[in-house]
Amino acid sequence: MTASAAIRATILKMLTERGHVGPIGDHDSLFFSGKLDSLAATEVMMLLERDHGIDLTDADFDITRLDTLAEIEALVAQPA
């Protein structure tokens, strides 16, 4: 499984566990659609840190960078 597929699977699993089912496009807004709120975004951050070794502890990190699957995948793909 590619890193992008693993990230997508992680996010979709978490959203499904929170009761959000149905398709999500790469550029669909997770915040605007109500699939992601600040608590769920924090959970996404923790999952990315734990499962993918991404350090999101920077005080300047903008949580809106987690708004779409494409943005999350791009964030994880960035070099450390």
Image: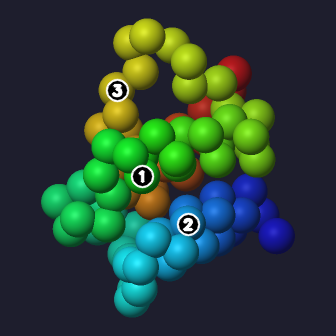
Side (left or right) of 5 relative to 66: right
Q: What residue is rendered at 38% in x and 78% in y?
A: 20
Secondary structure beneath disc 1?
Answer: helix
Q: CA distance from mark 3 to mark 2?
A: 21 Å
Direction top: furthest residue: 59
- Residue 34: image x %, image y %? 23, 65
Specify which label sits upstream in the sequence, 2 or 1. Answer: 2
Looking at the rendered structure, the secondary structure element under dot 3 is loop
Q: Secondary structure at mark 2?
A: helix
Residue under pointer 1: 40
Q: How many marks?
A: 3
| Numbered badge on residue 62 | 3
Mark 2 vs 1: CB contact within 8 A: yes
Residue type beneath disc 3 = Asp
Q: Residue at x 17, y 60 (%)?
A: 32
Determine contact: label 3, label 2, CB under 8 Å: no
Callout in the foreground (3, 2): 2
First along the sequence among labels 3 and 2: 2
| Residue 5 image point, x, y percent | 68, 68
The correct choice, above or below, for 13 with respect to 6 in the image is below
Circle on res. 14: 2
